[in-house]
Image (tube, rainbow, N blue to C red):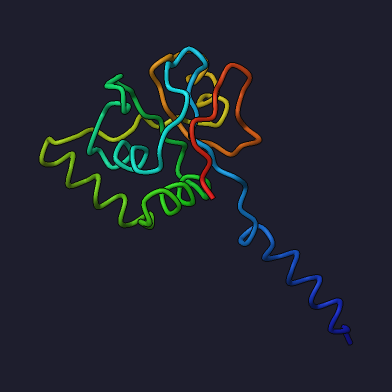
Amino acid sequence: MHSARTLLLLFSGLFAPAFSHAELVLVASVRNPAMELSHERAENLYLGSTTTLADGTPVKLMDLPNGASRDDFYLKLTGKNPAQIRAYWSRLVFTGRALPPREANSIAEARQWLIDTPNLVGYMERTDVPPGARILLRLP
């Protein structure tokens, strides 16, 4: 018979990834003139309401591949779950009002894009930020 402690350890190990969330940050190349990004501006960018930084600098956006980090990012930034984000962007694309962020195939590709593209803004876990990238906003 398993003790309560053994069962607790087993269940905590199984469900730990679901409850541990790494710190997500919005980042850009150090060649990007932006030094910081407000939560509101970041939300407007990722919901297609604007395509520029507060100073008028045009930016391109990058999405991570489908998965937990992407879902967590949109939930923290916009309060929308994955289904709501897909529906939202489908409407924008269908009506021709905006194009969704460019989707990287991997974290490695996202890191490289950020280093190579001065006007690109993206997001990733804090631990994935490459040298040559600057953190513009931390998401709680």
Q: Is residue 57 above or below residue 10?
A: above
Residue at position x 84%, y 84% in the image: 4
Residue most toward the left?
95
Q: Residue at 49% of width from left, 51% of height from top?
A: 72
Locate the N terminus and report the quarter of the image it occupies: bottom right
Left-right relation of 93 to 57: left
Q: Nearer the viewer, residue 105 or 62?
A: 62
Left or right relative to 41: residue 130: right
The residue at the point 47 percent across, 31 percent down is 105
Residue 137 in picture, x, y percent from top left:
49, 36
Give above or below for 134 relative to 99. Answer: above
- Determine the image quadrant of residue 59: top left
Which percent across, then down, holds residue 41?
33, 37
Q: Please indicate whether residue 75 sits to the left or right of residue 86 in the image.
A: right
In the image, residue 22 above or below residue 12:
above
Image coords of residue 36 (percent x, y): 46, 29
Q: In x, y percent, where is residue 5?
A: 86, 79
- Residue in view at x 30 percent, y 19 percent: 57
* Count of numbered circles on the image: 0
Can you name the residue that lies furthest to the bottom here? 1
Q: Nearer the viewer, residue 112 or 130?
A: 130
The residue closer to the viewer here, 8 or 78, is: 78
**In the figure, residue 135 lies in which quadrant?**
top right
